[in-house]
Image: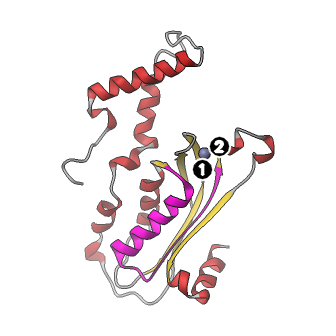
Amino acid sequence: MSGKKKNSFSEDKKKYQEVVAAITNIFEYLGENPTREGLKESPARIVKSWERLFGGYLQDPKDVLTTFKEDNVVPFNQIILLKDIEFYSTCEHHFQPFIGKAHVAYIPENKVIGISKLARILEIYARRLQIQERIGNQVTETIMTVLGAKAAACIIEAKHLCMASRGVEKQNSIMVTSSLKGTFLENPKSRQELMSLIK
Ligand code: ZN
């Protein structure tokens, strides 16, 4: 990890105090008494929870991937797929969670990575302020550029709480996005094989 990257959001004490004060202000805005027992520690608790929820800002996917450089092999032309990766993200339009699962796949050229790294890449991008479409695109972009893969795919199914909380009829809607690159995009047979593996 590079030297200038933060290890924690609370490193900047002044900024931290300002953010805690801002959340206290929001409670007042809602008509609450921020000094009452149940609420007085909440701003600090909320900021602390962001270390995990938005931990993706503290990490660079390239740091995760380059560590496995020496494990390079010459693989055969095959799909490597990690299915049903659960994830948690936050909608950048409403600051509300969206949760679901993703399927991440690639076809290597001459570099492979440990399969758990596919989940790590997803995690790093998901734990930021996001839209679902961008997460998929960032995951496939990273796999294509850092690994020099022949193909990459990230299919995401998620429930958006910003939708669910605003209307009963949308409680169970699932949004599906599919980011495909390389041969998954160009070759229908390759794409078909991927889809049959995911089903
Ligand atoms: Zn939203």
Which residue is disc 1 drawn over?
99
Residue at 34% across / 23% down in the picture?
17
Which residue is disc 2 drawn over?
161
Start and end of the magenta stretch? 130-159
Mark 2 packing: few (<14 Cα in 10 Å), some, or many (20+)?
A: many
Q: Secondary structure at mark 2?
A: helix
Q: Secondary structure at mark 1?
A: strand
In reply to whether residue 141 is colored magenta, the answer given is: yes
Can see residue 86? no
Q: Quadrant of the C terminus?
A: bottom right
Residue most extreme to the right? 169
Query: Which image quarter has ligand 1?
Result: top right
Residue at 59% across / 48% down in the picture?
98
Up-down: is 174 above or below 42?
Answer: below
Judge depth for marks 1 and 2 and give the one in front: 2
Q: Is mark 2 within 8 Å of ligand 1?
A: yes
